[in-house]
Amino acid sequence: MRTNYRVNAGVRFEVFSRDQLEELFNGVLHVMDKIGLDVHHEEARNILADAGAHVEDKRVRIPTHLVKRALATAPRSFTIYARDGNPAHDIQIGPGRAHFGPGPTPPNFIDVETLERRPYVRDDARIVATVVDALPNIDFCESLGTISDVPTDLAAAYEFATMFPRTTKPIVAWSFGWDDSNDIHQIAITEAGGQEAFERRPNYIHYCEPLSPLVSTFEAVDKVIFAARHAVPVIFTTCALAGGTAPVTPAGIIIQTTAESFMGLVLSQIIRPGLPFFTGGVLSVMDMSAMILSYGAPELSLMMAGVTELAHYCGLPLWQTGGCTDSKCLDEQASLEGSLSVFFSALSGGDLCHDVGYTESGMTGSILQTVMMDDAIGYSRRITRGIEVTPDTLAVDVIRDVGPDGHYLYHDHTMQHFKTEFWYPNLCDRHNYEEWAAEGKQTMRARVIDRTREILATHNPSPVRPETAEAITAIMAAAENRVKNKP
Amino acid sequence: MSEILKRMSSAVIQGQRDDTRQMARDAIEGGCSAEEVLYQGLMPGMDHVSGEFKAGRMFVPEVMRSARAMLNAMEVIKPIMVKNGIRMAGKVVLGTVQGDLHDIGKNLVGMMCEGAGFEIHDLGADVAPGQFVEAVKAFQPDIVGMSALLTTTMRAMEGTVQALVEAGVRDRVKVMIGGAPVTQAFADRIGVDGYAPDAAAAADKAKHLIAASR
């Protein structure tokens, strides 16, 4: 039997059977068609109604054929490009590829020097982008905070303007509305060489967050319309609390959040068929004692794995969640919760896994957590890469060569494979006791902090083009004037 | 007489929402005073619930049912207490501020305050400053509570305080704020009376503010 002999299947696990996926998908279609969602955006309601949706006041019901048409036009595989043309920083979305990055908008940040929690400031966006650019297993960039020391309305635009020159890894941007979405887009297309060039090689993704249960807020919808009209790959997902803003059961929250995403899917595909679209979100439990959305709960990983399977069943890429924790500092809890959720996210193959570096249940961003998780992601990726089975890797001839009582150290086969078959950590220590003691008995925590500071002291990201640097200055000056003159 | 009050306590603890109204009626008909129903029946039950919640042995959905069980009984005894001129725990007007539809946190605050014996007038989400002003005039609350999840909508808290000042009702109420981006420093800056980091702390803070003002 030599069927599939050369197929490298990787390591997979499954949450659902095919029958169960059909049940879930039918649940989503039922919610969209029979229950409907409230869409707080008149223009969007008109667009949807013209396409055949049933609109009654704010409530919009989407017939199944519209959902299926949107699923048929939205791509499963596409590329988000590094702004400087470095293919190593491109993100290729497609089956079996899990990518990782930080998350948006916590109010607080762990100061890299003092290690204390404090409000997030503009310079933190520089820190996060620089470190993200240097980490080998982080693929995209988000800021881990909302900038508090610029005019409130410009927090998102300043964040993008600060991060964009400091990393060539694609940024997942967020914004408050149309105006700052446009600020961000102008910066990105200047670097790309204009709108047309951007459409051929999109260099960022836009994130929009509607509300659970079943509400498409004005801002989220306005932004998805902006993204569709400007060909920006888009994420339209909720943060749902099982038992609070969504059903307490994993199957129920998966149905509801997918329906919430699908409203954005349908709208975006009507405006621009073929626009890259991510479904998904943050699915976790509302802790019924602490009253928080838990970012360290096992249910988060399980629900995220389930919603990933449903997305892939529907032929869509997914906005995953992992590498996050409810811990308040860089400790054993942060390591445990972050690593396990990273591993499950990698196993599920969710396409973009965000919130790597979220601590304190999403209240505080920590680039230290991101740096620690970089090792956990490397570890996980070695496992999900699986075991290649070929005549060469089966190594029967090598076993014959070496024979009983020999050794493999000097064999060509070892030389040929040891660097690719083995993964080496950057932070986890494997030295013997004496060496470890001689180096000052450093803990993981200390190594994480040292590495972060070292990256900041030494890493120089590839710069933006001079015209982009000028454009950033001009765009932000105009934005300042806009908010100053705002009533 | 103490038998029915004891049963009422345990009905509150067990969250028997449909039973407490009738129990309160029976207690009053059986000769209990409204105050006895409240302080020897309902409140001991609710105090137990809040102790169990703080100890991590009872959970939000259970506390909500207990609070509802108590409120249903309150409907029966409140008119009597008002007639007798007995002061209630206090009234709270609650809402998520203008431009913000996030209301799960605000709902939790409402539940915890109900559990603490407050009467809640929940204005919902996306509440304009004018609606807060109208509610203050209509309901005569002791406390106005505002919630926001976004840094942009958080600014509406300041506008709402301003509207209360302009309407000449700011001095009649204590103002409390909360929500993910909200801090004590922000509360101090916009001149409100209280901030709480979570729903349980909000109920405690509300009790504290009322006690201090009376």
Image (cartoon, coloured by chain):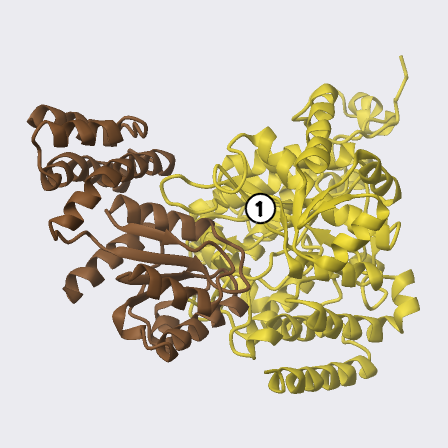
Chain colours: A yellow, B brown
Name the quarter where the C terminus of chain A is drawn. Answer: bottom right
- Residue at image position (29%, 46%) is B114
Identify which residue, B36 or A457, lies in the foreground.
B36
- Residue at image position (45%, 69%) is B130
Position of A463 relative to B19 (above/below) = below
Q: Which chain letter matches label 1?
A: A
Residue occupied by mark 1: A212
Amino acid beneath label 1: Ser
Is residue A276 among the parts visible in the rendering?
Answer: no
Identify which residue, B46 or A142, lies in the foreground.
B46
Position of A471 relative to A324 (above/below) = below
Image x and y of residue A236, in percent: 70, 51
Name the quarter where the N terminus of chain A is drawn. Answer: top right
- Residue at image position (51%, 33%) is A248
Is residue A232 among the parts visible in the rendering?
Answer: yes
Position of A372 relative to B52 (above/below) = below
Image x and y of residue B23, in percent: 20, 27
Residue B35: quadrant of the picture: top left
- Residue at image position (74%, 62%) is A169
Apparent side of residue A210 relative to residue B204 in the rendered image (left or right): right
SS for tag 1?
loop
Local crowd size for mark 1, using a 10 Å CA cut-off: few (<14), some (14–19), many (≥20) = many
